[in-house]
Image (cartoon, rainbow, N blue to C red):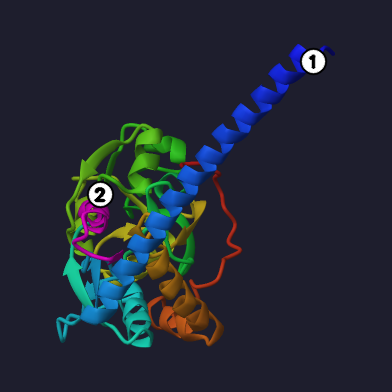
């Protein structure tokens, strides 16, 4: 190799090193800025003494109003209240439907969304999630008289599927050819009654939520067939790169998992079932939705 070629290669190596160093420097600078902003936000929350949380308030037994006291309660509400207590913060709720909760986190209206939000890869690109507080799988509610003509996910084609527009379950419905019927933060009795009277045919959602809802309203002639799919994990939602808040929340959730608090809350709201731990239920149909 002649000296001229050696010099050219050496210059190329130096140039590439400078480019890589520049990229790393930019990345490190961005991370430092994000960490600074995250720390400032947490300091602001601590100073105010308040954690602002979005929750639907209509999702039994996760987030709902007690019929006797009208008090906001439920599994994720009590979980969030306990996290706030351990962080010495008051939890202030805004009742927002599923389609508005993500925007509320992004625009700073709230710090956290506490609902039955599934952790997915596509959502993790846009938001930070806490450690899972609930594990479950998908099921469906149909009419008791004729099972709405649905005996597998393939039978969803042409059926009217009720739900919120932005849920994973509505994505599954559309994937299998169902016609979406969109609801905005309505109560469970309306969902179930509309299936029973034929306005809609099916509701796809989390098994434990559906089980508790159907059992709470035995007068409405609907049922849950043994069609189970897509194991899920549920977490609290925060703005992307809100690392300080996420670390504080995860620390408390980990402690609540270890000391049995999450198990006690789960058993209280889910009829003795411990949704804070993974289930070994038989999944009858495999499905992938990002």
Residue shown at 30% from the left, 37% from the top: 159
Residue at which label 2 appears? 164
Badge 2, how many Cα within 10 Å: few under 14, some, many 20+? some
x and y, in percent, of residue 15 in the image: 60, 28
x and y, in percent, of residue 19 in the image: 55, 32
The number of discs equals: 2
Mark 2 vs 1, N-terminal side: 1
The answer to whether residue 155 shows anywhere in this view is: yes
Residue shown at 23% from the left, 51% from the top: 99
Badge 1 marks a residue whose secondary structure is: helix
Query: Relative to 197, is 1 on the left or the right?
Result: right
Nearest the camera: 73 or 238? Answer: 238
x and y, in percent, of residue 211 in the image: 39, 66
Assess whether residue 178 is covered by the magenta stretch: no
85 above or below 228?
below
In space, the residues marked 2 and 1 are separated at their CA atoms by 69 Å
262 above or below 213?
below
Residue at which label 1 appears? 3
Nearest the camera: 3 or 125? Answer: 3
Nearest the camera: 28 or 187? Answer: 28
Badge 1, how many Cα within 10 Å: few under 14, some, many 20+? few
Query: Relative to 96, is 226 on the left or the right?
Result: right
**Front position among marks 2 and 1:** 1
For the record, the magenta segment spans: 98-113
x and y, in percent, of residue 66 in the image: 20, 80
118 above or below 217?
above
The answer to whether residue 272 shows anywhere in this view is: no
């Amino acid at each position: 190799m002649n000296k001229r070629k050696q010099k050219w290669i050496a210059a190329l190596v130096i140039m590439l090193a400078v480019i890589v160093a520049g990229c790393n420097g930019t990345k490190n600078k961005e991370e430092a800025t994000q960490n600074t902003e995250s720390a400032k936000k947490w300091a602001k929350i601590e100073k105010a003494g308040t954690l602002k949380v979005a929750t639907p308030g209509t999702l039994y037994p996760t987030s709902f109003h007690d019929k006797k006291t009208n008090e906001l309660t439920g599994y994720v509400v009590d979980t969030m209240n306990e996290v706030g207590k351990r962080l010495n913060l008051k939890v202030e709720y805004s009742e927002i439907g599923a389609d508005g909760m993500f925007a509320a986190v992004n625009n700073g209206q709230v710090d956290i969304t506490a609902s039955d939000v599934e952790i997915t890869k596509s959502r993790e690109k846009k938001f930070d999630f806490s450690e899972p507080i609930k594990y479950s799988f998908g099921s469906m509610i149909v009419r008791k008289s004729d099972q709405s003509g649905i005996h597998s996910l393939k039978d969803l084609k042409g059926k009217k599927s009720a739900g919120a527009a932005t849920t994973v379950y509505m994505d599954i419905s559309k994937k299998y050819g169902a016609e979406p019927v969109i609801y905005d933060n309505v109560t469970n009795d309306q969902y179930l009654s509309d299936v029973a009277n034929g306005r809609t045919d099916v509701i796809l959602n989390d098994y434990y939520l559906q089980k508790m809802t159907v059992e709470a309203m035995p007068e409405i002639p609907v049922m849950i067939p043994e069609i189970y799919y897509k194991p899920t994990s549920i977490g609290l939602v925060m703005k992307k790169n809100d690392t300080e808040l996420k670390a504080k929340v995860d620390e408390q959730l980990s402690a609540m998992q270890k000391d049995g608090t999450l198990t006690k809350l789960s058993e209280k709201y889910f009829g003795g079932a411990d949704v804070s731990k993974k289930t070994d239920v038989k999944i009858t149909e495999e499905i992938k939705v990002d």
